[in-house]
Image (cartoon, helix red, strand yellow):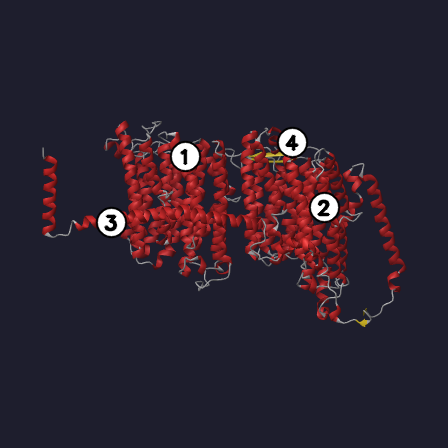
Amino acid sequence: MTNGNIFLLWLAIPFAGAILAAALPRSLKSSAAFVSLAAALAMGVRLFSTESFVVSSSIASRLGVPAVFVADGFAFFMAITVLAVSLLIAVYSHGYMARESSTGEFYFLFLVFVGAMMGLVFSDHLVALYIFWEITAICSWRLIGLRREEKHLAAANQALMITSVGAVAMLSGIALIYAATGSFSLAALKEYRVGAVASLLIIAGIFSKSAQLPLHLWLPDAGVAPTPVTALLHAAVLVKIGVYAFWRFFNASMALDPTVAGFVSNASVATALVAAAAASKENDIKRILAYSTISQLAYIMFAFSLNTVTAVAAGFTYIMAHSFAKAGLFLSAGVIEHTLGAKDLRLLGGLKKTMPFTDAAFIMCALSLVGIPPTVGFFAKYSIVSAALDSHRFFSAFLLLVAAVMTMYYIFRFYKKAFTQDAGEAVTSRREGPVSMVFAVVALGVISIALGILIQFPTGLISKIL
Amino acid sequence: MNGSTLFIPVVFALTGLAVAFMPASWRKARAITSVYASFLALVAAVLFAVYPSSFEFSSGWFPTTISGGFNLRIDSFAAIFGVLMTSAFFVFFIFSSAISTKKSSALYLVAAAAAAGAVFSADFFTLLVFWGVILAALYLVLQDTDEPTAQRAMVVLGVSDFAMLLGVVLMARLSGTYDIAGAMARLPEGNLSMIALALIAFGAIAKTGSMPFHNWIISATSKSSVGTLIIFPAIIDKVLGIYLLARILPAMRDRADVFQPVLITIGALTLILSVLKALAQHDLKKLLAYHSVSQVGYMILGVATFHPVGVLGGIFHMFNNVVYKSGLLMGAGAVEKATGTTEMSRLGSLSSKMPATFGSMLVSSLAISGVPPLNGFVSKWLIFHGLLAAAAVAGNRYILVALFVAMAGSSLTLASFLKVIHSVFLARAASAADDSNKSSALAADSNIALRAPQIIMASASVALGAFATIYVGIPMLVETSYAAILMVIAAAIAGAAIYQFKISRRVRRADIFFGGEEYRDEYVFGGGDFYKTVEKLGWLAGIYSVSSRSREDDGGFYALVTKTIRAVSSALYYSVERVIYLLQLFLIKAVEGVIFVLRLAHTGELYVYLSWYLVGAAALLWILAP
C-alpha cells in the first residue's frame, strides 16, 4: 500500500514544475520542464511497480468524499504513456521554442496541462474529472493562441468554443446521473445502467474533446499553433482524454445502453473513413496529420465501444502505439516547418537528402501509423480488427481496414511530396533540424519499432492489469 | 519445443544487424559475413530436411491475448522449401556481395530472415508478421533509389496484406485456431470460410506478383539494383506466395468449384499477357521482369489443377524459376556492370567478351523456355500432365484452353529469348566504339562473385533437369528423364569432340557481306526490334497500347486502388466533411445574427431603453389582463 500523500505529491510534480518554469530565468525554463517531467516519469514507473491500486487521500477525506483519486493500472498505463511522450516533446521544445518570445507562458501552460491530464487520468470523482477536463481546455486555448496572431486566436477560440459546448453537455449528463443516483463517485456507480439521454450528453462532450465527427473541425484549424503544442494536443494528450474518459465512464464503471454503444461504434467507423478521406485531400502538412489523428482516434473509440476484454486491451495498445507514432510524425512536420518555414506539401520536396534523420524517423512512425509489422502499430491494428470480429462486426472490421489502406495512401503521399520528389521552392535550407528536435523525433521512431519487436511487454502489462 | 528452429531466421537477422552497424567501406567484411551466414543457414536447412521428424517451437514473443503466440514448425514440407530457399539465398549473397550497397545488403538479410520465418511459421499470425516485415524491407530498399516504385509496391502489397490480415482473423474465428494445419482441417462449410480463404489466397497471389499485381516489378527495373530484383520478386515473393497457396490447398480443393476457375483464369491470363509484353521489350531487365510475371502463370496453373502431379509441377516450377530466373537476372546484372546499360539496342557481340555470362545465360534461357533436358521442361511437363488430368474431370473442359495457352506461352518465351541471346551476345554492337570497354566487360565476366553464381545456377538447371527421376520419383517421368540424361551425355560428347578436333578452327573467316555490299555500321540489325510486327497486329494492339500509356496509369492493381481511394476520398470529403464545415459556419453565422439583433437593443441610448420599458410594460399588461 503506497502512502496516499506520496501519490498526491507525484500528481503535484508537473504543477510544481510549472511554477518553477514560470519563475526561473529564460535559459532555464526548458530544463525545468525536462527535469520535472523526467522526475514524474521515474516516480510514476516506481509507483506503478508497487502495485497499489486504490489510494484514498487525506485531502479527499477532508472534502467529505471517500476518494477523489483512484489509482488503477490503466490510469497508470495512460499516465506513463503521457509522461513519456511529454518528456520527448519537452526535449524537442528546447530547440523549437528557442526563437519564440513567449517561452515562459509556453512552459507554464505545458506543465499545467500535463498535470491536469494526470489529475484527470486518476480522477474517480465526476466533478474533479470535469474540473481537470476544463483546465486542459483552458490551457489548450492559450497554447493554440500562443503567438497572438489573428488567425491563431480565431483557431484557439474555435477550439475553446467547441470543447466547452461539449463540456457543458457533459456536465449536464453528469448532473442527470447525480440526480438519478445521488453519487459522483465512479467507483460507486459501477454497473449502473446510464440513461440514453445522460450517456448521449456525456458522449457529446467526449466527441468534442476527441474531435470525432461532427465536432472535429477545431482540431485541423488548431494546427497553426507551435508544433510542440500541436503534438501535445493532437498526439499525446488532449485528444486521448476523450477516449480515456469514455473508457472510464462506460467500460470501467457504468454500463452503456447497447443501442448507444452501437451508435458510437458506427459513428467511429464513419469518422475513421471520413477523416482519412479529408487527410488525403489536404495539402497542409499539419492539417493532414490532424485529420489523421481524428481518423486514428476513431479506431480507439471503436474498440472501447465494443466493451469486451480484448477490445479494451486493443484500445489501450492503440493509444500507446498512436501516441508515439503520431507525436513522431507531428514533430517531424515541426522540424520541416521550423527549418524551412513552409507547411504546404506543394512547396516541399527532396528533404530525404537534406534531412536524413528526420526522414528515417518519419518512415518508422509512418510504418507504425499504417500498421506494417514489426512496428507496434501493426499489433494494435490487428488486435482491434480481431476484437471487432469477436463482437461479430465483420463489416466494421472491413471498413476499418479500408481506412487503413487510405491511411497508407495519404501518409506515403505526404512522404513522397515532402521527402523524395524534386525539391520545391520553399526548400531553401540544406540543413537538418536542431539536435534536440531531431533527437526527440528519432527517439519516437525507434520507440515505435522497439515496442513492436518487444510487444509482449506492453501487452503483458495490459493483460496483467486486466 | 525446440529452439533450433529459430536458427535460420536468427542467423540472417543478426547478420543483417551486424552489416547495418559496419562502416560503409567494409565491403569485404560485409560480403564474407553475409555469404557465411547464408551458408550456415543452408547447412541448417539441409539438416532439418534430412532429420526425419518435425521441429516445433513456441513462445510468448507475440502476445497470446490477441493471437496464438509465436509458433514455428518445420515439418517436411517446410523443410524442403527451407532448403530450396536457403540454397537460392546462398548463391544470391555471393552475387550480391559484388554489387550491393551497405543499406541494401542489410535489408536483404532482414528480408531473408523474415522469409525463413514465414516459411517456418506454424500459425497464421506469425506468418502475417513475417510477411509484413518482408514488405517493410522491400519498401525501404526500393525507396532508396526509386520512391514511386516503392510506393507502388507498398500500396499493392499493403492492400493484399490487409486483406490477408482480415482473412487470418476471420479464419481463426471460424476454425477456432491460428495453427495453419489445424485451421485447414477444421474450417467449417459456409460463405464466411470461403471469404476467409479467398482473402488469404488474395494475399498469396498478390505476393507472387501475378497480373494484375505485377506493375511494381516492371517499374522496379528502371532504377533499382538487380539484387533487389533477384531477391524480392524472383526468390522470396515466388517462394512465399506459392508456399502459402500450397498450404491452403486442402481447403481450396474442397471448394474447387469456385477456386479452380478463378485460379486457372488468373494463371492463364498472366502467362500469356506478360509473355506477349515480354516479346516487345527492348530493355533486358524489363524483359526479364515480364518473364518473371509470366512464369508465375505456370506456377498458379500447376497449383490450380488440384491434382498431385500438377501441384508438384507448380511447386517444382517455382523452384526452377528461382534457379534460372536468378541466373538470368544475374547475367543481366553482369552485363549492366560491364557496359553500364541493359538497353538491348545498345548492346551486342558480348559473347566473346563475356563467355561465362553468355554460356550460363544461354543455358538459363533454354531452361526457361522449357527445352529438354533442362529443368524448365520437367516442371512444365508435370504441369501439362496435371492440366490434362484436371481437364478430364467432368465440367472442366475449359482447362484445355489453359493447357493450350501454357504451351503457346512456352514457345513465345523461347522466341523472346532468341531475341535476347541474339541482340545481347551475338549481333554486332550498334556503336563501333564499344571495343573500348572490352576490358571492363572481361573484368565483370571474370569477377568470381559475379561469375560463379551464374555458373552455379546454369549447372543447377542442367542437373535438375537431367536427374529429375531421382528426386521427383514419378513413373511417367522415367522415360523422358532417361532420354534427358542421354541428351546431356550426347551434348557433352559432342562438345568434347568439337573441342578435341578443333572444328571451330577450321572455319573460314571472311568479311561480312550484306546483300552483296561490304559490311557497314548502318546495316547492323539489332535484336531490339525483332518482334515489332507483333505489336502492330490488330487484335493484339490492346495489350501493347497499355504499355505506351503514362507511368501513373498502367491499368494495373495499383492504378485501380489509387484511383478508387481518390474517388472515395473526394466523395466523402465533399459530401460529409465539408458539409459539416458549412453547417458549423452556418451555425456560427446564425449565432452572430442573434447577437447582432440583441446588440441593436443594447445601444446605450436612453430612448432605446425607454422603448423597451414600454414594450415590456405592454407585454405585462397583456399577460396580466383578465
Q: Position of residue B22 (x, y in %)?
A: 58, 54
Report the disc number at residue B254: 4
Which residue corresponds to mark 1? A305
Q: Looking at the image, tell me whether mark 4 or mark 2 is earlier in sequence order.
A: 4
The type of residue carrying mark 2 is: Val
Looking at numbered disc 3 in the image, what kind of residue is underneath it? Gly
Give the labeled residue for mark 3.
B593
Q: Is residue B120 visible?
A: yes
User: Whole-Å distance between the Cαs marked 2 and 1?
Assistant: 53 Å
Discs 1, 4: same chain: no
Name the residue located 55 percent from the left edge and 30 percent from the top edge: B174
Front one among B65 and B61: B65
Q: Which quadrant holds residue B548?
A: bottom right
Please indicate, yes or no, whether residue A16 appears anywhere in the rendered image. no
**Secondary structure beneath disc 4?**
helix
Question: Which chain is mark 4 on?
Answer: B
In the rendered view, tell whether residue B459 sits above or below residue B163: below
